[in-house]
């Protein structure tokens, strides 16, 4: 079995270039400012508002609920 050093070196060089390119792309992505999507913010705030409304309705319900007493006859 013969081993071709030229092909091996060429494959190593291509692999190294590929890895360098991938790492450069990752570095560029990491440097980008992080922005939350507007849709997620709106949905999140809407969910918080619904929870607040629900808890207020529960409080209102507990205050206005008449106390039912059983009558023993």
Image (tube, rainbow, N blue to C red):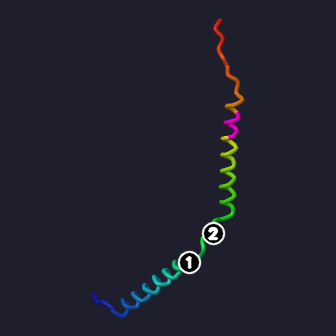
Q: Which numbered dot is residue 31?
A: 1
Secondary element at image label 1: helix
Specify the segment rendered in magenta: 56-60
Q: Residue furthest top?
A: 73
Name the magenta segment's main secondary structure: helix
Q: Which residue is mark 2?
A: 35
**15 relative position to 4: left or right:** right
Which class describes the residues within 10 Å of circle 2: few (<14), some (14-19), or many (20+)?
few
Secondary element at image label 2: loop
Q: Is residue 54 above or below residue 39?
A: above
| In contact (CB < 8 Å): disc 1 and disc 2 | no
Q: Is residue 63 above or below residue 68?
A: below
Viewer-side residue, 47 vs 8 = 47
Q: Is residue 59 magenta?
A: yes
- Residue 16: x and y in percent read 43, 86
Which class describes the residues within 10 Å of circle 1: few (<14), some (14-19), or many (20+)?
few
Question: Where is the C terminus found, in terms of image quarters?
Answer: top right
């Amino acid at each position: 079995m013969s081993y071709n050093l030229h092909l091996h070196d060429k494959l190593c060089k291509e692999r190294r270039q590929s890895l360098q390119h991938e790492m450069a792309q990752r570095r560029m992505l990491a440097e980008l400012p992080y922005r939350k999507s507007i849709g997620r913010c709106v949905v999140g705030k809407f969910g918080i508002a619904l929870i607040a409304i629900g808890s207020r309705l529960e409080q209102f319900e507990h205050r206005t609920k008449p106390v039912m007493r059983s009558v023993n006859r």
